Amino acid sequence: MSLKTSKKTIFRKNTPMKRIVEYVAEADYKSYREFLKEDFKGRCGYCDSFYGIVKKDYHIDHFVPRRLIKKFITHKHLENDYTNLVYSCPSCNISKSGKWISENPDIDLVDEEGFINPCSDNYTSLFYRDQTGAIKAVENNKTATYIHKELNLSLERHKVTWNIEQLVNLIENIEESPNPTLKETLSNSLLENLRTHFELVLKDDE
Ligand SMILES: [Zn+2]
């Protein structure tokens, strides 16, 4: 795939799917780390960065933030409820922190602004990648614009991580290809991608 020919690409290939975990009152949410890593396939639920490229320990984010959970006795279970946990890169977790559009855990959207469940196709469809691999909010969508801004999805690191992963995948395909013609085509594509990427990076710096 050449970055030059594809102007817009999908934000992420897969929407994460979480297993059903029976709620255990005395459980500690940190004990679900391995479940989360598996269910999210090692990818941040918010920006889709792969932990293998980011090379940093991922966090466990509370979708309804702990700040609010602590205020409402009726929602205390969300502290250790698997349905409220999101595998998250440090950047998205820190950006999201205690943010919530209302002071009511049950009201997640106000005038279409707020966070929606990242494990939903609706979340996946809020964003796309431009020709540089940067995450963009779809036009005229207040929810997309809100999340994009509040999670700092325009940060350079999200674009760089995505581009590195494309290059790593391409290199793996070249190495695994038994066909010399295909190998050459893929190698040319790799060079083209590298050139495009550096052109774009240089352009950004101007
Ligand atoms: Zn992230």
Image (tube, helix red, strand yellow):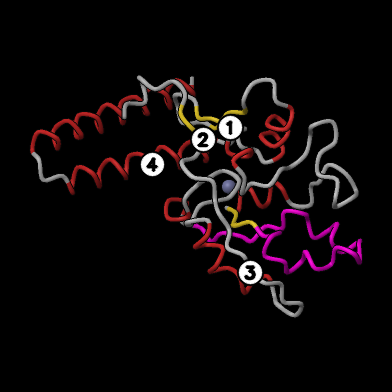
Going from N to C along the chain, the mark reached first, 3 or 1, is 3
Please identify, in this view, whether the residue under mark 2 or under mark 4 is nearer the observer: 2
Where 125 falls versus 71 (above or below)? Answer: above
Three-letter code, disc 3: Val
Q: CA distance from mark 2 to mark 4?
A: 15 Å
Callout 4 environment at 10 Å: few (<14), some (14 to 19), or many (20+)? some
Which residue is labeled 3 in the image? 21
Please identify, in this view, whether the residue under mark 3 or under mark 4 is nearer the observer: 3
Q: How many marks?
A: 4
Three-letter code, disc 1: Phe
Going from N to C along the chain, the mark reached first, 1 or 4, is 1
Q: Quadrant of the N terminus?
A: top left
Q: Secondary structure at mark 4?
A: helix
Going from N to C along the chain, the mark reached first, 3 or 4, is 3
Is 132 displayed left or right of 106 in the figure? Answer: left
Is 183 displayed left or right of 142 in the figure? Answer: left
Q: Are marks 1 and 2 in contact (CB under 8 Å)?
A: yes
Q: Are marks 3 and 1 in contact (CB under 8 Å)?
A: no
Is 202 displayed left or right of 19 in the figure? Answer: left
Which residue appears farthest toward the bottom when viewing the image?
A: 26
Callout 3 environment at 10 Å: few (<14), some (14 to 19), or many (20+)? few
Q: Secondary structure at mark 1?
A: strand
Three-letter code, disc 2: Phe
Which residue is labeled 4 in the image? 164
Which residue is labeled 1 in the image? 127
Q: Are marks 3 and 4 in contact (CB under 8 Å)?
A: no
Going from N to C along the chain, the mark reached first, 2 or 4, is 2
Specify start and end residues of the magenta stretch as a single range: 56-85
Q: Are marks 3 and 2 in contact (CB under 8 Å)?
A: no
> Going 39% across and 22% down the picture, which residue do you hit?
6
Three-letter code, disc 4: Ile
Q: What label does residue 11 carry, if any?
A: 2
